[in-house]
Amino acid sequence: MSHRSLLEVTVNHGFDRLQRILTTMSVGDDISPAGAAEETGLSVEVCRAVFAGLERAGLMTKGPADHFTRCSLDLMKS
């Protein structure tokens, strides 16, 4: 297996682990990019970017100390 293929597999496994973490979170649960990076093997920056995207989508809110909290999606908000 080439170095590139190994890296792709590692990154894919990291995103799979992050997806499992995110799908098991309940409303009110929080997570930090550093904690997610430690659990998934992804970089802190990648985890922060994912959480920021989820925040823009209305699924997370950013709190103090670089923590993101899972929130409910209010489809009735405009």
Image (cartoon, helix red, strand yellow):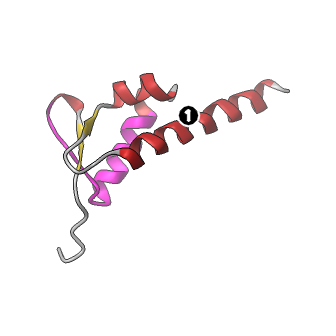
Q: Residue at x 39, y 30 (%)?
A: 36
Crowdedness near tag 1: few (<14), some (14–19) or many (≥20) residues, C-alpha within 10 Å: some
Q: Is residue 25 left or right of residue 13?
A: left
Q: Residue at x 17, y 74 (%)?
A: 77
**Over which residues does the magenta segment extend?**
46-64
Q: Residue 27, position in %: x, y? A: 23, 51
Q: Residue 39, position in %: x, y? A: 45, 26
From this viewpoint, which residue is outermost toward the right?
Answer: 1
Dividing the picture into quadrants, the one containing residue 15 is: top right
Residue 5 versus residue 25 in the image, above or below: above
Q: Is residue 20 left or right of residue 5?
A: left
Q: Residue at x 50, y 29 (%)?
A: 42
- Provide the major secondary structure of the magenta segment: helix
Would you name the residue on which mark 1 appears? 14
Q: Residue 18, position in %: x, y? A: 47, 39
Q: Residue at x 33, y 46 (%)?
A: 52
The quarter in which the C terminus is drawn is: bottom left
Q: Amino acid at mark 1?
A: Gly
Q: Tag 1, which secondary structure?
A: helix
Residue 14 versus residue 27 in the image, above or below: above
Residue 48 part of the magenta segment: yes
Q: Nearer the viewer, residue 56 or 74?
A: 74
The quarter in which the N terminus is drawn is: top right
